[in-house]
Every structure is written in structure tokens, then in C-alpha cells.
């Protein structure tokens, strides 16, 4: 896919220091540039982006697709964990957007593609801070969509549903969540059932990372400029469900469908 893209674009891929060698080995070729950028380091983000702008004279398309996912009930979150989640998924994309906008405005052209998720459309237990970061990205993108239209700059949100990958095994648990699981504390059933539930959804998902990448690539050249682009049947379904059902009914329905909900808060510890 990237080989085809380089016929039309020079592609700049960024990664953290420990991931950059693997990225270079996996994805290389004519027209592909690799840069060191750790989204948790604002100073490095600014330095890298300013170097790119200086080397290339501007950015035509910015794709914000990196992200992390903390799994934790709200009570178990600590400030440093909250900040890491919001910095990576929200503040870093915001910073990069701010840096590319002047050159885009100067050309009256450009595209900003922010990768959200079904977690930016709806929230689930143990994923509150992740959804908060994606909700924030969605709100920012919607505001930016209005602000940039007079300048010919198009803003889009890609909203994948559950993706068939092992990414759910790489989620970050808050320190208090780890302790609660190990000690089978008050929220043990929350973590147990939600972990199994999400694993099942992702193992059975039809959407692949490659398909999401194809949708992003197609969006780069699309003549239409949608603010939101759902990817996958579940993404379309939850968007439809939220629009059509009254809010009270929507939340009661989803609550009733949570896995093992009749045993949450009872003191019983499932296995």
C-alpha cells in the first residue's frame, strides 16, 4: 500500500526510539522517510515537526493514528496515568495540528485525518479515560472542521469499530487495577468480564488493521470530505443506535447487555 502511495506522496513515518528500528526494517522504500517522535514528549514532537516543515516546506496531509489505551475504572486512575493517556491520544495530536496549520492556510489546502474509534462514539466500563481522550479528539476535530473550511483545509475523523488484532493484549492497566485483579478486590468482576468481552469482540471482528489503513489512504484522495467516517458494521451500528434511541433507553439497553452485570457490586468474585 505504501509503495503505491509513494507514487503520489512522500511519506513521513514517525515512531518512538524503541520502535523506530522495527519500523524502518518493516516499511522502507523510495519516498519513505522515518523520524523519531515520542508523543509523550511535547518538546520532541515540536522539534521533529519543525524539522519536517523545514525539510519539506509543509505538510499536505497529517494523519494522527498513534494511541494508547488504559484500562481502569475511574476510581483506580492516578494523575500520571491520566496524563499519559490524554497526552498521547489528545494533546500530542492537538500540538501537531497547530504546527501544520500555518503552512496549510498559506496554501489554502491540506487534510487532517484523526483516527478515533468506536470508543469515541460510546463509553464502556473500565475504559473511561480512553474514551475521554477520544471524545476530546472528536470534539476538537468537529470544531476544527468548521474553522478550516474557509481555508480549504479538510478535517476528518476515522472511526474504526473493533479491529481483529492482538492490540487488546497490549492495553495498559493502571497500577490500582493490577492490584485489584491480583487481590480480587471490589472491581474484580468488572475487569474479568470486560476483558473477556472485549477479547471476544476483537477475535471475532471482521475489520483488520490493513482495511483501516486502506480507508485512510482512500480518504486522502477522496473528492468528498466527510467529518466522520465509520469503519466496520459495529461502528455504523453504534452510531445509528445512539442517534435513533432516546438517551435514557440507549443507556439502559447497553447497561443491561454488559457482561455479568448482575454480579457487579455484589461482592461475589467470578473466575
Image (spheres, helix red, strand yellow):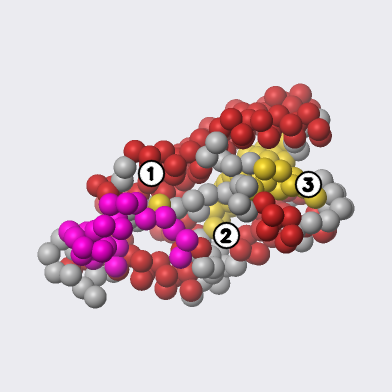
Residue at the spot of label 2: 231
Q: Which of label 1 and label 2 is nearer to you?
A: 1
Identify the residue shown where x is 24% and y is 47%.
75
Which residue is depicted at the point 19% across and 60% down? 185
Marks 2 and 3 close (CB-CB < 8 Å): no
Residue 175 appears in the figure: yes
Check disc 2 and report its element: helix, strand or loop.
Answer: strand
- Residue range in magenta is 169-192
Residue 124, how many percent across, how many down?
35, 56
Which residue has dot 1 on it?
A: 81
Secondary structure category for the residue under label 1? helix
Give the label on residue 187, or none. Answer: none
Counting residues from the N terminus, which is met first, the one under dot 1 or under dot 2?
A: 1
Q: Could you tell me if residue 142 is visible in this image?
A: no
| Residue at the disc numbered 3 | 33
Q: Which numbered disc flags the more N-terminal residue, 2 or 3?
A: 3
Q: Position of residue 157 (x, y in %)?
A: 58, 46
Q: Quadrant of the C terminus?
A: bottom left
Amino acid at each position: 500500500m505504501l509503495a503505491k502511495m509513494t507514487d503520489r506522496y512522500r511519506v513521513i513515518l514517525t515512531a518512538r526510539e524503541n520502535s523506530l528500528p522495527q519500523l524502518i526494517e518493516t516499511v522502507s522504500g523510495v519516498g519513505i522517510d522515518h523520524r523519531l517522535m515520542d508523543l509523550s514528549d511535547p518538546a520532541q514532537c515540536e522539534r521533529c515537526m519543525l524539522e519536517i516543515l523545514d525539510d519539506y516546506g509543509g505538510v499536505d496531509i497529517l494523519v494522527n493514528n498513534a494511541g494508547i489505551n488504559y484500562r481502569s475504572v475511574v476510581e483506580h486512575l492516578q494523575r500520571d496515568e491520566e496524563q499519559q493517556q490524554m497526552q498521547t491520544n489528545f494533546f500530542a495530536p492537538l500540538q501537531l495540528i497547530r504546527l501544520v496549520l500555518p503552512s496549510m492556510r498559506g496554501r489554502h489546502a491540506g487534510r487532517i485525518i484523526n483516527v478515533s474509534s468506536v470508543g469515541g462514539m460510546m463509553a464502556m466500563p473500565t475504559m473511561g479515560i480512553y474514551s475521554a481522550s477520544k471524545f476530546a479528539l472528536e470534539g476538537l476535530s468537529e470544531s476544527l472542521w468548521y474553522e478550516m473550511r474557509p481555508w480549504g483545509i479538510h478535517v476528518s475523523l476515522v472511526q474504526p469499530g473493533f479491529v481483529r488484532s492482538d492490540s487488546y493484549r497490549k492495553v495498559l492497566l493502571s497500577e490500582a487495577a493490577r492490584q485489584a485483579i491480583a487481590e480480587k478486590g471490589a472491581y474484580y468482576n468488572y475487569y474479568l468480564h470486560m476483558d473477556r468481552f472485549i477479547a471476544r469482540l476483537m477475535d471475532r471482528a471482521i475489520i483488520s488493521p490493513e482495511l483501516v489503513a486502506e480507508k485512510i489512504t482512500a480518504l486522502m484522495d477522496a473528492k468528498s470530505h466527510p467529518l466522520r467516517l465509520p469503519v466496520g458494521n459495529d461502528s455504523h451500528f453504534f452510531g445509528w443506535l445512539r442517534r435513533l434511541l432516546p438517551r435514557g433507553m440507549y443507556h439502559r439497553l447497553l447497561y443491561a447487555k454488559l457482561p455479568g452485570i448482575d454480579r457487579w457490586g455484589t461482592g461475589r468474585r467470578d473466575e
